[in-house]
Image (cartoon, rainbow, N blue to C red):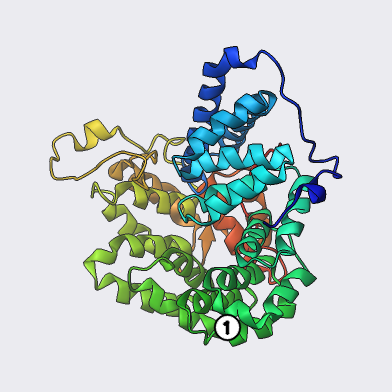
């Protein structure tokens, strides 16, 4: 086990509490707290890059999660027992809740039990990593440091992944891990380290990235090139392009970086190539969004008549121009817009990435653009109606919706080679 009780007990930041009497009578309330906290965590995971959620919405959601977690923690042993029962479902939300309770308790046996099971199941691991990001800074640093000092590669991965979420620089500990010749035989850990180099802008580890570009494992090769681009190696873009042209787990990460870095003429060539494949139409819309050239607005307007593309095209239009469809009454009700379209194939559920986005009224948007779009110059890059610059991007980060903040964070990290890639999905409150 990575931790023992002697290691944890002396730290006052992680007290081990005693059971409080009489809480069993409130078991139904505590059970509901556990269920609601897990559900809200899952909801939040869908919301982290959604244009449907503003920064205020995320803060409100975070506060609700913390409220339920505080209720569970105050229930002490009863709260733990209920969370442990739910933990057996092996779901990420339930894992998050149980991990928070374990980490807060300071009980090494609880921590090791939760970590061992969650690290052995890829479905549960995200909840475990997330839980570390919800601890206050002193608690998180203490646990992450101990995970990074472990000889077990599973715990090293947990520590590095937590550093990625918290944007915490492990400094020499990361160097030490990468110097281990066995690290390249641990694909998940190796790739996570390479990704962290780019996120934190660790220019001192460029040589590690250069070496990893030819690694046997695809995940290591991808994240080495991805991080190299963030550190200013524009030539590495060529290694990311193939990921855009085919279905793979890295497509979105490749797409957003490539089209924020490529010169406009080269980006246009790649968009033309993508356009030849009808199955890549959503990829084309996303590429145009990231490029940010107003010359593409007429094409986006045409896509707004297609039920499966309307909302994504509306989002692209808004991210490029800064024009809020709902605020300017440029949207329409879906039931009215497509009530006779039995072939639309629209399913509004949690799995639909466009769920919650406004439905643009094509005619209204086009008329508005004709009246107000003259200030945006074709051939230039725009984001939220402003030419892309450090100043304009920093204005979006505190108050934009999650889609805007995510895009702004990446654009800023590309523009400023020493600026850490901000994690806009990080919790706004801690426990």
Image vertical order of residue 291 relative to residue 429, above or below: below
Residue 85 x, y percent position in the rendering: 50, 33
Question: Crowding at label 1, few (<14), some or many (≥20) Cα neighbours within 10 Å?
Answer: many
Q: Secondary structure at mark 1?
A: helix
Q: Give me the residue at 70% from left, 59% from top.
A: 147
Q: Give me the residue at 60% from left, 87% from top.
A: 211
Residue 273 shown left or right of residue 381 in the figure: left
Residue 425 seen anywhere in this rendered image of the structure: no
Identify the residue position indicated by label 1 in the image. Answer: 212
Residue 214 x, y percent position in the rendering: 52, 87
Quarter of the image with the N terminus is: bottom right
Q: Nearer the viewer, residue 95 or 237?
A: 95
Quarter of the image with the C terminus is: top right
Q: Nearer the viewer, residue 348 or 398?
A: 348
Residue 301 shown left or right of residue 290 in the figure: left
Q: Give me the residue at 68% from left, 77% from top.
A: 178
């Amino acid at each position: 086990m990575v931790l023992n009780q002697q290691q944890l007990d002396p730290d006052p930041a992680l007290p081990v509490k005693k059971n409080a009497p009489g809480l069993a009578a409130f078991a139904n309330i505590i059970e509901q707290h556990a269920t609601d906290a897990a559900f809200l965590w899952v909801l939040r995971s869908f919301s982290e890059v959604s244009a449907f959620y503003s920064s205020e919405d995320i803060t409100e959601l975070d506060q609700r999660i913390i409220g339920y977690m505080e209720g569970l923690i105050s229930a002490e042993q009863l709260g733990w027992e209920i969370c442990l029962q739910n933990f057996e479902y092996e779901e990420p939300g339930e894992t998050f809740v149980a991990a928070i309770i374990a980490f807060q308790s300071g009980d090494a046996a609880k921590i090791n039990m939760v970590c061992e099971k969650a690290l052995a199941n890829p479905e549960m691991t995200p909840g475990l990593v997330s839980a570390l990001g919800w601890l206050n800074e002193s608690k998180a640093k203490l646990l992450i440091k101990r995970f990074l000092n472990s000889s077990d590669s599973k715990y090293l991965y947990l520590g590095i992944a937590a550093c990625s979420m918290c944007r915490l620089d492990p400094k020499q500990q990361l160097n030490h891990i990468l110097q281990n010749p066995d690290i390249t035989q641990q694909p998940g850990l190796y790739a996570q380290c390479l990704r962290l180099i780019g996120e934190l802008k660790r220019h001192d580890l460029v040589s590690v990235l250069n070496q990893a570009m030819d690694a046997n494992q695809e995940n290591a090769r991808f994240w080495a090139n991805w991080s190299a681009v963030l550190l200013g190696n524009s030539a590495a873009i060529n290694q990311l392009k193939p990921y855009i042209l085919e279905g793979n787990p890295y497509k979105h990460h490749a797409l957003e970086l490539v089209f924020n870095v490529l010169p406009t003429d080269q980006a246009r060539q790649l968009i033309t190539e993508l356009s030849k494949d009808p199955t890549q139409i959503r990829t084309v819309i996303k590429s145009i969004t990231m490029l940010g050239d107003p010359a593409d607005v007429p094409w986006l307007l045409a896509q707004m008549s297609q039920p499966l593309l309307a909302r994504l095209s509306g989002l692209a239009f808004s991210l490029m121009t800064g024009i809020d469809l709902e605020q300017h009454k440029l949207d329409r009700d879906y039931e009215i817009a497509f009530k006779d379209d039995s072939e639309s194939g629209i399913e509004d559920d949690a799995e639909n990435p466009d769920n919650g986005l406004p439905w643009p009224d094509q005619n209204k948007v086009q008329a508005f653009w004709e009246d107000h779009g003259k200030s945006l110059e074709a051939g230039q890059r725009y984001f939220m109606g402003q030419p892309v610059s450090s100043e304009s991007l920093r204005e979006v980060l505190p108050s934009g919706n999650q889609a805007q903040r995510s895009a702004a964070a990446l654009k800023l990290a590309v523009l400023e080679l020493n600026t850490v890639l901000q994690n806009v999905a990080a919790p706004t409150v801690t426990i």
